[in-house]
Image (tube, rainbow, N blue to C red):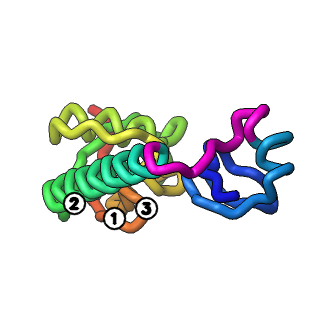
Amino acid sequence: MKVILLQDVKSVGKKGEVVNASDGYARNFLFPKKLAQEANDVNMHILNKKNEADRKKKLAEIEEAQKVANELKDKEVIIYAKSGDNGRLFGAITTKDISQEMEKQLNIKIDKKKIVVNTIKTMGLYDVEVKLYPEISTKIKVIIKEQQ
């Protein structure tokens, strides 16, 4: 019997896949636990519509990420921080600080989880990677200056 999986099922398949399952397994296990539904014409049509909508959504997200990446490319963010001797900072500059300054200076809101950088503890110029989508990333320059 062909079934459409509604959730990931170990050793059977992933959500949204159409798989062959024995009649007994489908009727006695998959259907009662709402893990699958029968792959009839109506359900297949619904699945195809859903897959098409998901594909369009993903393309729109990729396009938006590419647009933001082009906008951010080679931009600079200046962060002022208090420092002690030899340019060492009191505390550290984190991804949260960089995200907040990007929003203030560039008017672009980026989630702190998308910024890839080690903790910054000294003044200077740093290249920071911003991962906007799994395969789309860009670099910005972060300049740490002493607060007057």
Residue with the mark numbered 3 = 134
Q: Residue at x 21, y 40 (%)?
A: 108
Alpha-carbon distance for marks 1 and 2? 7 Å
- C-beta proximity under 8 Å, tags 1 and 2: yes
The answer to whether one can see residue 142 in this image is: no
Indicate which disc, 2 or 3, sits on the residue closer to the N terminus.
2
Amino acid type of the residue that numbered disc 2 sits on in the rendered structure: Gln
Residue with the mark numbered 2 = 66
- C-beta proximity under 8 Å, tags 3 and 1: yes
Left or right: where 35 falls relative to 24: left
Determine which quarter of the picture holds residue 36. Answer: top right
Alpha-carbon distance for marks 2 and 3? 11 Å
State the image coordinates of residue 82 (x, y, percent, origin top left).
Answer: 40, 35
Magenta range is: 31-42
Alpha-carbon distance for marks 3 and 1? 6 Å
- Residue 37 in magenta stretch: yes
Q: Residue at x 33, y 33 (%)?
A: 100
Crowding around mark 3 (Cα neighbors within 10 Å: few <14, some 14 to 19, many 20+) is few
Q: Name above or below for residue 148 compared with residue 141.
A: above
Residue with the mark numbered 1 = 136
Q: Secondary structure at mark 2?
A: helix
Crowding around mark 1 (Cα neighbors within 10 Å: few <14, some 14 to 19, many 20+) is few
The answer to whether one can see residue 127 in this image is: yes
Nearest to the observer: residue 21 or residue 55:
21
Nearest to the observer: residue 146 or residue 104:
104
Nearest to the observer: residue 135 or residue 102:
135
Q: Residue at x 39, y 53 (%)?
A: 48
State the image coordinates of residue 21 (x, y, percent, origin top left).
Answer: 75, 59
